[in-house]
Amino acid sequence: MKKRTIGIMGAMPEEIEGVVALLANPEVTKMGKRSYFTGQINGIDTVVVFSRWGKVAAATTVTTLIHEFKITELLFTGVAGAIHSDLKIGDIVLGKRLLQHDMDARPLMEQYEIPLLSKTYFESDTVHLAIAAKAVQKVFENKALHTVIATEDLMQFDIAQPKLVIGDIASGDQFFSGNEQKQGLATQLPNVLCVEMEGAAVAQVCYEYEIPFSIIRTISDVADDNSHIDFPAFIQKISSKYAAEIIKNIFEQI
Ligand code: SAH
């Protein structure tokens, strides 16, 4: 059997800091403007890295994790903009299916279809999805949530009872910050829960190399004209805390 090595990519440098702090015997390798932190969590070899933003950056980072660090599984955490109206800031979406909303090679193939793969969606497998779901739910238990995050920080972002939703995530090289842009995507792809800039690129590379993956996204904004969110504060007070806790909970199960 291949030796198990888990790759963890974070879409925010602040998220990475909390996860790197979990590593025993940490070492850093610098390559291509990225710092790869290696070590062990609960005795399992782990590599942690900031993905950088956008599909090309994220695809390059995961490819390096596969070739240079021989990862056998991939966990991705980051923030995302809500597309579905049921989602609130502080909720978490687990990607069951990942799609690239800016892929369009018509008339050669259907809109959103990935060339040469005859696929539109990359699916996360049920085993890894279940582990990640359990890890998130554990953070959301009322007592746990208030232990991990200060009550006043939860109140600042109006987070009362955050929920986990599992479903479709759309990725593309666009930051969504307008009602029209958001409505356009919601109309075209009614099943999409949230939008971000890396997940489906990472999922494509993992699919091509047969690496199981989990894409975990905290809703940081609602992707419209009214997204007045204090990003740095949200990352520091909420999503980076979620990320470290979820990773800890995942390692407790594996
Ligand atoms: N600009 C912010 C945060 C970076 S935005 C800052 O000043 O720090 C880019 C990251 O946020 C990407 O990882 C992307 O996947 C995610 N993201 C969050 N909300 C998004 C939205 N509404 N549209 C697209 N990507 C979003």
Image: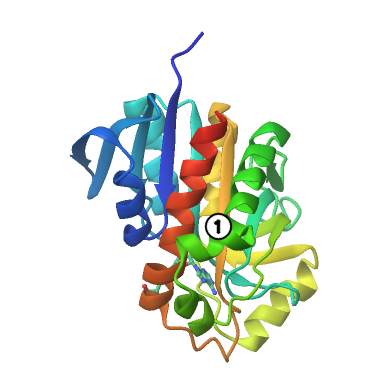
Q: Residue at x 38, y 60 (%)?
A: 12
Q: Tell me the element at label 1.
A: helix
Give the amino acid type for the residue marked by disc 1 in the picture.
Ala
Neighbour tally class for label 1: few under 14, some 14-19, many 20 plus, Cα within 10 Å: few
Res. 84 image quadrant = bottom right
- Residue 43 location, x and y as percent? 38, 24
Which residue is most to the front?
143
The residue nearer to you, when weighing 171 against 215, is 215
Pointer 1 residue Cβ closer than 8 Å to ligand 1: no
x 80%, y 68%: residue: 190
Residue beneath disc 1: 144
Above or below, 44 against 133 in this view is: above
- Compared across the picture, whether 37 is left or right of 6 comes to left
**Residue at figure coordinates x 42%, y 51% from the top left:** 244
Residue lying farthest to the top in this orientation: 1
Whether residue 124 is visible: no
Q: Is residue 164 left or right of residue 33?
A: right
- Which quadrant would residue 237 be assigned to in this image? bottom left
Colour mode? rainbow
- Tell me which residue sits at (51%, 31%) in the image: 73
Q: Is residue 203 above or below residue 234?
A: above
Residue 23 pos. (x, y %):
30, 37
Q: Indicate the quadrant containing the C terminus: top left, top right, bottom left or bottom right.
A: top right
Quadrant in the rendering for residue 182: bottom right
On screen, 129 above or below 200? above
Of 138 and 210, nearer the camera is 138
Number of marks: 1
**Nearer to us in this view, 126 or 239:** 239
